[in-house]
Image (cartoon, rainbow, N blue to C red):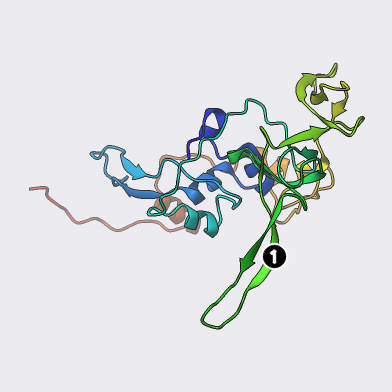
């Protein structure tokens, strides 16, 4: 998959914020390195053979399903993603579907996949699929209703909170300097839903309570706990434990 613009540098802001994982962990979890030079030998240049383009789907990049879909021998057609300068859709937004069997229906965005310009609308644009089918055991499987993703560029539009009709939006700044979404039809501000702040740890930043035993508080983060010294790790341990070296090393010769 080829990603343009700001998406080429990282996996996607909303994906990282939703998971509350560090960006370095997300990149490391889906990275596929097939060969690289040893790092502990300075005479070797830093070279490696790794996968450059990934196929992003509804599975999160750190999951096993994502790794299976991006196996080395899994050749699939390339996907080209249209670049979007400013992302305007968030989890919890009310949108109207413009295509398909649910055209004209409105729903709530339950998931955002920024890497493919996708949103999933809760209960709409669904299809049936069979899970767990086993012909040997003669088990027909379970039929479930699955929500298919929709393109934000052509398939959905945000709903104006005043007219309850789909509208184009643009980003503007308020007198206080806050960046907001404004409806082009009614000039009304479309606020970003609170559900967009949800992560694995909390539903809202305002109600999150720090765990003193596990969380690093702001006071702890500013404390200096390491003082650099011109000594080895073994020398630090010996000083801490009160060990004094009184042995005389044997003479050695280089020739």
Q: Is residue 187 left or right of residue 200?
A: right
- Answer whether residue 9 is visible to the viewer in this image: no
Residues 93 and 17: in front is: 93
Report whether 38 appears left or right of 163. left
What residue is shown at x 61% (from left), y 76% (from top)?
140
Whether residue 6 can be seen here: yes
Residue shown at 25% from the left, 56% from the top: 248
Q: Residue furthest right?
A: 162
In the rendered image, residue 91, in percent from the top left (x then y), is placed at: 75, 43
In the rendered image, the residue lying farthest to the bottom is 137
Q: Residue at x 71, y 44 (%)?
A: 100
| Callout 1 crowding tier (Cα within 10 Å): few <14, some 14–19, many ≥20 | few
Q: Is residue 185 above or below residue 56?
A: above
Residue found at the far top of this picture: 175
Q: Position of residue 61 (x, y in %)?
A: 55, 50
Furthest toward the left, the residue is: 255
The total of numbered circles placed on residues is: 1
Residue drawn where x is 49% and y is 48% of the image: 28
The image quadrant that residue 98 belongs to is top right
Residue behind mark 1: 144
Element carrying mark 1: strand
- For residue 108, side relative to residue 47 (left or right): right
């Amino acid at each position: 998959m080829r990603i343009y613009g700001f998406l080429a540098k990282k996996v996607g802001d909303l994906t990282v914020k939703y998971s509350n994982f560090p960006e370095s962990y997300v990149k490391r979890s889906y990275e596929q390195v097939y060969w690289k030079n040893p790092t502990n030998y300075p005479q070797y240049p830093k070279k490696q053979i790794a996968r450059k383009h990934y196929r992003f789907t509804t599975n999160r990049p750190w999951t096993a399903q994502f790794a299976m879909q991006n196996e080395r021998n899994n050749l699939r057609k390339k996907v080209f993603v249209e670049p979007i300068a400013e992302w305007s859709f968030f989890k919890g937004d009310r949108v109207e579907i413009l295509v398909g069997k649910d055209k004209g229906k409105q729903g709530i965005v339950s998931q955002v996949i920024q890497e493919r310009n996708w949103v999933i609308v809760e209960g709409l644009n669904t299809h049936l699929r069979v899970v767990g089918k086993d012909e040997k055991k003669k088990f027909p499987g379970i039929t479930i209703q699955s929500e298919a993703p929709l393109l934000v560029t052509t398939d959905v539009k945000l709903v104006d909170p005043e007219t309850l009709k789909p509208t184009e939006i643009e980003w503007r700044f308020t007198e206080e300097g806050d960046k907001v979404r404004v409806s082009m039809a009614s000039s009304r501000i479309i606020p970003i839903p609170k559900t967009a702040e949800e992560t694995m740890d909390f539903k809202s930043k305002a109600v999150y309570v720090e765990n003193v035993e596990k969380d690093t508080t702001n006071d702890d983060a500013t404390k200096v706990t390491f003082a650099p010294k011109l000594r080895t790790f073994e020398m630090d341990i010996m000083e801490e434990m009160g060990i004094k070296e009184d042995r005389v090393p044997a003479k050695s010769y280089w020739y």
